[in-house]
Every structure is written in structure tokens, then in C-alpha cells.
Amino acid sequence: ELILAFETSCDETSVAVIEDGHKILSNIIATQIKSHQRFGGVVPEVASRHHVEQIIQCTQMALDEAEVTYEDLTAVAVTYGPGLVGSLLIGITAAKTIAFAHKLPLIPVNHLAGHIYAAQLVTPLSYPFMALVVSGGHTELVYVSAPNDYQLLGETRDDAAGEAYDKIGRVLGINYPAGKAVDQLAHQGNDTFKFPRAMIKEDNFDFSFSGLKSAFINTVHHADQLGETLDRADLAASFQASVCDVLVEKTLHALAEHPVKQLVVAGGVAANQGLRERLTATMATADPQTELIVPPLRLCGDNAAMIGAAASVQLATHQAFAGMDLNAVPSLDLV
Ligand code: ATP
Ligand code: MG
Ligand code: FE
């Protein structure tokens, strides 16, 4: 089984070829970050334009690197949401065109299902498993009882974890996307500020990061007014300690109430070294029975390989194929 997969939901143009749902034959990722940085965030029109310019070349590179042709393919997969409508449409149009021209089934994939099934590129999945989805737009605890069968246990009530990183990064003078640089800075400091850990003791699986963001910004502004400069590494470390405490605590709570075989950490923030270290250490002592799966860095951020992996699961479970009327769904939910 060979799936050609497209991912263009935001600011990465990515095309991959996945064999049997788990083997990456190619995973081309063209990032546009440099074009958006001077605006401090992703500009939708600029993103679509880049996708148009990149998509054909990325597709050719993905096929070449995998050493396959269109004739070898089993199906074509594409992210149809959530994401920026103009960006999604470029991938959808490319996928539809190839599916139509080569008479291949078209598999519509939810971007978040993609993040979750990135884990399948690392190790075989056994059900039920739990997914902690932490990305630029989402923070969710998802119980996956069977292939492609999701139950949302809880989610953020305001900012996503990655969004909070990007916003406090701006206050520290760090360019978008700030997550990685804040993470690195955090490793040089200590949790001296003791920012709030919102909802950590509440008996639910929801999150809130806007209070932490405000506390962080107020602390910096207050010091500015007094003419003081605060230690940036300590600020970053304090912010990261708060985010990680809440994510780890809530995840353990979810695992205690919904026992599973595996815990999958998914999305851009899964690349966070602090979170990876904390989860590895905590799971080893608090819940050694549950296998922790954290994808390598390249598979945490947006990429088409994860879309191919999720599509393979849909193919195996005979989930409906899309027709030529497939459209982008910018605010698509997982469940
Ligand atoms: P979504 O997947 O919710 O639709 P998205 O696709 O924009 O949103 P991703 O690409 O999955 O989000 O992740 C990008 C986010 O991950 C950004 O907010 C970025 O700052 C954050 N991020 C990347 N690396 C790290 C890191 N090491 N530590 C913390 N955050 C990180
Ligand atoms: Mg991105
Ligand atoms: Fe994403």
C-alpha cells in the first residue's frame, strides 16, 4: 500500500509517500516561516501564494525520493481541515487533480488525526490509547478507543499551549514561532516566578493558559515601569514549568480514570524538550504500565507523513472516501 499525502493547512507545504501506514519513503517539508516572520505571524494570503508556488515541486520531490510513480500509488490523502481556508484549498486541489487523473481514491484527513497518527510512524499502536494533543491551535486530551475513533475528554478553554508560547515569546523579543527558542531559554533558567497553574486541581480534563499568559505579561510590564530588567531565562523557565506542570498533571489524571496501553504526545509543542523530559520521568515512576510514545522532532510539527499514516488507518477501516466535491473545512473538529 502506497499513499501520497498532502499537508498545506498552515505555513508548511508538505508532501509525503507512506508505505503500509508506517514506513516513510519521503516526507518533503517546505517551510515559509521566513516570509511570515516580519509580520509576527502567518499571513493567510502570503501562505496560499507560497503553497501554490511550492506544491508541484514538493510533489515531484516526494515521488522522486520515494522512487515511485503515480502508477504505483494506492490512494491520495489530504488535510481538509482545520486550518487556513486558502492554504487548505491548495493541497485539496492538488490531491483532487492527481486522484482524478490517475483514478485513485481520495482520502480526506483531519489535521489533528494526522498529528495523533504521527505516532504510528514510530511504533505500532495498540488500542485504547490516550493522545495529548498540544499544538499551535489546540490543547486536547483525546481517548482513542479504536482506529480513528475519538472521544474528547477535555480541551483548552482559551489559548492553546503553542499559542501561549508564541505570545509570551513576543514579549521576550523572540520571533514567531517562539516555542523552540523559549524552550531553549527555559533550560538556562529556574522557576523563580511561580506563575499560576490554572485548573490543575480541578476534576476535569480542561486547560486554560490565558491567565498564565497575562501573569507573565503583567510581571514583565510591571518591572519595565520600575525600570527593572528581569532574567529572561528565569521568565522562560517559570512559564515552561507552569505549562508542563498542568499538561503532565492533567494527563496523569486522564490516564488514572481511563486506563490505556499507550500515551501518544502529538503536535508542535510535543517537540518541547521540557515536556518530553518531564513526561518521560513522570510516566516511568507514576504509570510504568503505559507506554509513552513521543515522535521525533521532525514528526511533531506539521508534515504530510502523519497525514499519510492517518489516511492508511481510514483506508483499513473503510472510512468513506471523498469525491471531487471535497471542500476545505477551516474549523473542522476531531469529534
Ligand atoms: P494545529 O496543529 O493546532 O492546527 P499548527 O499546525 O499551527 O496548529 P503545529 O505546527 O502543530 O501547530 O505546532 C506549531 C506550534 O508549536 C507553534 O505554536 C510553536 O511555537 C510550537 N512549538 C514548536 N516547537 C516548540 C517547542 N520546542 N516548545 C514549545 N512549543 C513549540
Ligand atoms: Mg506550522
Ligand atoms: Fe499542526
Image: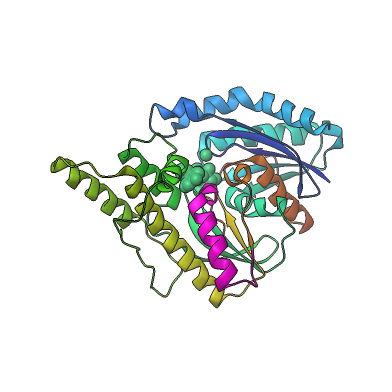
User: Which region is colored magenta?
Assistant: 268-291
Magenta-span inclusion, residue 177: no
Q: Give how far across and how far down residue 42 sits, in percent.
A: 44, 34
Q: Residue at x 72, y 65 (%)?
A: 126
| Res 151 → quadrant | bottom right
Which sits in the foreground, 110 or 106? Answer: 110
Q: Is residue 136 visible?
A: no
Q: Give how far across and how far down residue 104 sits, in percent.
A: 80, 40
Viewed as shown, does residue 141 lie left or right of 219?
right
Q: In this view, which residue lies farthest toward the right?
A: 71
**Colouring scheme, one of rainbow, by chain, secondary structure, one colour:** rainbow
Quadrant containing the C terminus in the rendered view: bottom right
119 up-or-down from 34: above or below: below
| Res 257 → quadrant | bottom right
Q: In this view, which residue lies farthest toward the bottom?
A: 257
Which sits in the foreground, 69 or 256? Answer: 256
Q: Is residue 281 visible?
A: yes
274 up-or-down from 54: above or below: below
Q: Residue at x 75, y 58 (%)?
A: 124
Q: In this view, which residue lies farthest toward the left?
A: 226
Which sits in the foreground, 192 or 265? Answer: 192
Q: Main secondary structure of the magenta part?
A: helix
Viewed as shown, does residue 84 lie left or right of 227?
right
Q: Give how far across and how far down residue 20 sits, in percent.
A: 81, 49
Viewed as shown, does residue 261 lie left or right of 165?
right
Report how many numbered discs are placed on residues in the image. 0
Magenta-span inclusion, residue 290: yes
Which sits in the foreground, 11 or 168? Answer: 168
Q: Give how far across and how far down residue 118 sits, in percent.
A: 66, 50
Q: Residue at x 62, y 40 (%)?
A: 303
